Image (cartoon, rainbow, N blue to C red):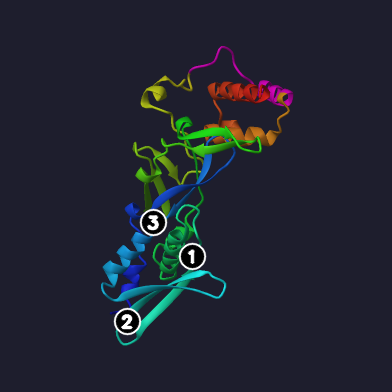
Amino acid sequence: MKMDNLQKLTRPLDSDDIELRVGHFIGTSGFVELLAYKTARIDTKRLDEVFPFRWRNHFERDSKGRLFCTIGIWFEGIGWVERSDIGVESFSDGEKGEASDAFKRAGFKWGIGAELYSLPKIKINLKSNEFNVEKGKDGKDRAAQTFNLKLNEWTVKNDNGRIIITDETGFVRFDSDKKYNPKPTETMQEEKTQPTDTETPDRTITDADIKKARVIAGLKPEWIIDTVKTHFAKEYKDLTTVEKASLLKLIEKELNK
């Protein structure tokens, strides 16, 4: 085997090989950070493609009980070259998940999917039907995804370092070239009924109205900044009159909690 096969082994993963999951919710408004990852089958697939019948793996535990996976590749004129890493047991799959994690980490040591470590932070707004807010045992509100969030059907495209994520409807949910990403509407029909920038509420909402309402509600200026970023994916100075009216309703809602 030629060493230049390592270039084939470490080439960026195809979009179909990258999966997404919710890393954590930021607050309870549906603003989340997504994590991109590979499954163990991707490492097996890549190794079989580049080094068919020329690779092997084995597992062993160290004196502290930690599970290591070692992936070895046979190179002509050199022999077996091995790289190892430790796995972390998962809550759902136990030892099976630990073995899978160790195998994937060892694959990273060979450069399979290494570009996933250099991805930008993927923060997006979810639709209202893609998450629920419930009270936890400590009495605090907790956000959690619903079955309507179909991350397994989303596509991750790496265009020379520009990351574009499209959902199952074809809507672009994340573009690393944009400072803020839009919050999608629930359906196309809803999108058509949204007020346009040329429409105005019953009366013009001014900055003074927003400030007064914020003070009455006891909200810090940072709350306005974060809320505008989360709900409108822009800065306050860029809000339209219609959006300011919506912001005022959000403040009133917060006041009535």
Residue at label 2? 75
Secondary structure of the residue carrying tag 2 is strand
Instruction: Identify the residue under disc 1.
Output: 87
Whether residue 36 is situated above or below residue 147 in the rendered picture = below
- Between the C-alphas of marks 1 and 2, the distance is 26 Å
Q: Position of residue 114 (x, y in %)?
A: 43, 63
Outermost bottom residue: 77
Is the C-beta separation of discs 1 and 2 under 8 Å?
Answer: no
Residue 192 in sight: yes
Residue visible at 44% across and 52% down in the picture: 36
Position of residue 6 measured from the top left corner of the image (x, y, whole percent): 34, 73
State the residue in front, 256 or 202: 256
Residue 85 falls left or right of residue 223:
left
Q: What stretch is highlighted in magenta?
A: 199-216
- Residue 217 location in percent, x, y? 71, 25
Q: In which quarter of the image is residue 102?
A: bottom left
Disc 3 vs disc 1: Cβ atoms closer than 8 Å? no
What SS does tag 3 mark? loop
Residue 216 in the image: above or below residue 50:
above
Compare residues 207 and 254 and report the one nearer the observer: 254
Q: Earlier in the sequence, mark 2 or mark 3?
A: 2
Q: Which amino acid does label 3 sit on?
A: Asn
Q: Residue 214 carries which label?
A: none
Percent x, y of residue 31: 53, 39
Relative vertical location of residue 5 with respect to residue 26 in this rendering, above or below: below
Disc on res. 160: 3
